[in-house]
Image (cartoon, rainbow, N blue to C red):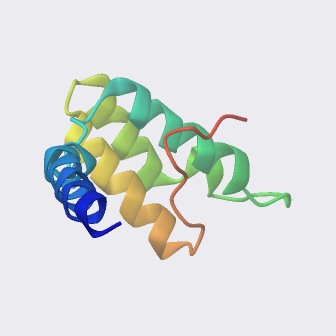
Amino acid sequence: MHSLLVPSIFLLLIAAAIAAPAAFAQVPPSEARCDQLIEYFDYYGQSRGEGVTDGARNMTRIGAQSDCDDGDYGEGIAIMEKLLRDKRMGIPGTDWTR
């Protein structure tokens, strides 16, 4: 029993060391993520009353859309994530779709 346990643990540690960098790799900012966060805010962040200035009419959101349209995805994503946190909405995962 002991003769199989040591090699098994050793192989498990090697596999974990190989997989660890991939688990913490940063995904580069993308247009798709920018659009996803904006769509999420537009759908869930709007009030249903008259004369509201949130959802698609929120000026911070419009600024983030402008950054994304100009190709500055990192800035647009950072703005949208801050806006979502400030509104206490949470940040959706990359697999969120409406």
Q: State which quadrant residue 52 falls in.
A: bottom right
| Total marks in image | 0
Describe residue 19's horizontal placement relative to residue 81 as left or right: left
The quadrant of the image that shows the C terminus is top right
Identify the residue at image location x=19%, y=33%.
72
Identify the residue at image location x=22%, y=45%.
19
Spot occupied by residue 34 in the image (x, y as percentages of width and height)? 40, 36
39 shown above or below 5:
above
Q: State which quadrant residue 65 falls in.
A: top left
| Viewer-side residue, 39 vs 12 | 12
The quadrant of the image that shows the N terminus is bottom left
Identify the residue at image location x=57%, y=75%.
88
79 shown above or below 2:
above
78 shown above or below 85:
above
Spot occupied by residue 42 in the image (x, y as percentages of width and height)? 64, 44
Spot occupied by residue 23 in the image (x, y as percentages of width and height)? 27, 49
- Farthest residue in the right direction? 49
| Viewer-side residue, 95 vs 58 | 95
Q: State which quadrant residue 43 falls in.
A: top right
Identify the residue at image location x=59%, y=37%.
39
Spot occupied by residue 55 in the image (x, y as percentages of width and height)? 63, 51
